[in-house]
Amino acid sequence: MSGESKTWRPKLILASASPRRLELLQQVGLDPDALIPADLDETPNKGELPRVLAVRLADEKAQAAAKVAKTRQELAGFYLLAADTVVAVGRRILPRCEVVDEAAQCLRLLSGRAHRVYSGLTLITPNGAFRRRLVETRVRFKRLSRDEIDAYLAAGEWRGKAGGYAIQGLAGGFVVKLVGSYSSVVGLPLYETLSLLAGEGYPAHILWLNRV
């Protein structure tokens, strides 16, 4: 993720190991100079609202990654981007599913009803300032049959996903309605990301002119 064509621009760090977030950034012409994931305890605090959790975790990821980035001389003057996605039904925060029973419970809960996806976004600028956005998207699923749930679980796309599904995969066929940001549900709200970067002087759109 480095090359001759990038030496003239500020360094961009993505505080994530998520291939989805990297692909989304690359979709809009941004290729980070470093990936610095933060290994955090993402357990909600007692009574913590979904939107508050998304903002807090994005901030904590940004802070943890910035500590690492400051020890690397080649990343001096960096912009650092961190994000977190929380899926919720009302005030109930759904887990990032690691076992099939969790995913099955999430899918049964989401079946035939609306839920919300919150994306917290934190940008640390070269002068150390924090800029934040919270993006809320409403998603409604069709009523899922037992066969559909069983087949989706068998496909394995739910593993490691908040709410037990990946909208960019097979579960896209479950979505009846989406109001908000599709890219946010995938993992990174692109409009808000570009707006934050541009607002802080990062030459995101100028980079487009240099693409082959």
Image (cartoon, grey):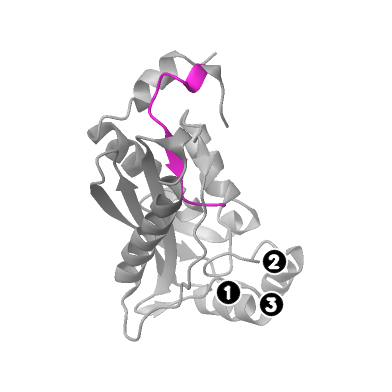
Residue in view at x 76 percent, y 68 percent: 154
| Pointer 2 residue | 152
Q: Amino acid at mark 1?
A: Leu
Q: Earlier in the sequence, mark 3 or mark 1?
A: 3
Q: Position of residue 33 (x, y in %)?
A: 50, 34
Q: Which residues are magenta?
A: 5-17
Secondary structure predominantly adopted by residues drawn in magenta: loop
Q: Position of residue 115 (x, y in %)?
A: 41, 69
On whether residue 8 falls in the magenta region, the answer is: yes
State the separation of the CA atoms marked 3 and 1.
11 Å
Q: Is residue 173 left or right of residue 199?
A: right
Q: Amino acid at mark 2?
A: Tyr
Residue in view at x 72 percent, y 64 percent: 156
Dot 2 lies on which element? helix
Seen in the picture, residue 150 relative to 18 is either above or below; the reply is below
Q: Amino acid at mark 3?
A: Val
Q: Residue 107: which numbered mark, if any?
A: 1
Pick out the residue farthest to the bottom.
46
Q: Quadrant of residue 190?
A: top left
Residue in view at x 62 percent, y 75 percent: 103
Dot 1 lies on which element? helix
State the separation of the CA atoms marked 2 and 1.
9 Å
Dot 3 lies on which element? helix
Q: Residue 100: which numbered mark, if any?
A: 3
